[in-house]
Image (tube, rainbow, N blue to C red):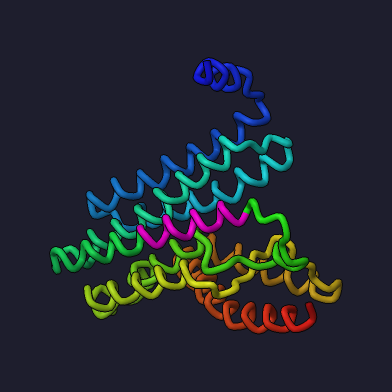
Amino acid sequence: MADKSRKGRLRMMSISTVIPNLITVLALCSGLTGIRFAVHERWEFAVGAIGLAAILDTLDGRMARLLKGQSRFGAELDSLSDFISFGVAPALILFFWSTDVLGGFGWMSVLFFSTCMALRLARFNTKLDDLDPKPFAARFFSGVPAPAAAGLACLPIILSFEMDFEILRTPQIVIGWLVIIGLMMVSSLPTYSFKGTKLPQKLVIPIFLIGGIFIAGALTEPWIALAALIFCYLLSIPLSFRSYRKLMKLH
């Protein structure tokens, strides 16, 4: 009887719910395709597929809110997509690119990063049910979020596209980097969510100018622009920690 009820709900799913979920499925497919590119050693396409998955991951939530198509099904699908696209795919890409020469030790880094991603997503989902969140909670994530963690994990390979530094491909360094990012995901380190952030009016024009410069850079030197964006995110982490502590003292 319960199965029939669930099937009925799925049959009656509205277009406003289907569209965001379709975008989520595309993000999942993009992440999986990144693994395929890595198997064939097409590294730029592999990283590009993860980047596309991140863009789609941003769009599906916004589309769901715009169409008022949020659903429990969509939230669960989004978590599964995030786990594959940002937890499994980046770790496997780096494994094929660098750490597979260490055999079991290289594989352990894949397992560690992916497990940290699963734990991070599970914690995020349980916090959605928090009935007494702090008034500024929407402005921060607890730990590094999934898409940002994927970008950080891929930083060595992104830098290698523009720099002929063999050290970037050193398996021990890549493993250490994956472990650090994994720990940052499951930590309680406050990081900006940027969703609830309100900019002072005097900063609007400078932000638009910076955005225009970034877009121009992304069109001409995409890997340099992406690396710069990732470094900017890294620099924002100490700032978010400081901002969070100030707000905690006020509340």
Where is residue 44? Give x, y as percent: 35, 57
118 drawn magenta = yes
- All told, the count of numbered labels is 0
In the picture, measured across the screen, residue 251 lies left or right of residue 23, that is right
Above or below residue 1? Residue 138 is below
Closest to the observer, 208 or 187: 187
- Point out residue 251 in the picture as x, y percentages from the top left corner: 78, 77
Quadrant of the rendered image containing residue 192:
bottom right
- Left or right: where 162 falls relative to 10: left
In magenta segment, residue 123:
yes
Q: Is residue 134 above or below residue 180?
A: above
Residue 75 location, x and y as percent? 57, 42
Residue drawn at x 29%, y 73% as measured from the top left: 174
Determine the residue positioned at 46% across, 45% down.
Answer: 81
Quarter occupied by residue 204 = bottom right
Of residue 138 and residue 96, the one placed in the foreground of this image is 138
Residue 240's spot in the image, x, y percent? 64, 77
Q: Main secondary structure of the magenta part?
A: helix
Name the residue at the front extreme: 1
Q: Is residue 120 left or right of residue 138?
A: left
Q: Nearer the viewer, residue 133 or 95?
A: 133
The vertical placement of 172 against 147, above or below, is: below
Write the residue at 60% across / 62% down: 215
Task: Tell me where the magenta segment starts and ends, as one range.
Answer: 115-127
Q: Residue at x 62, y 80 (%)?
A: 241
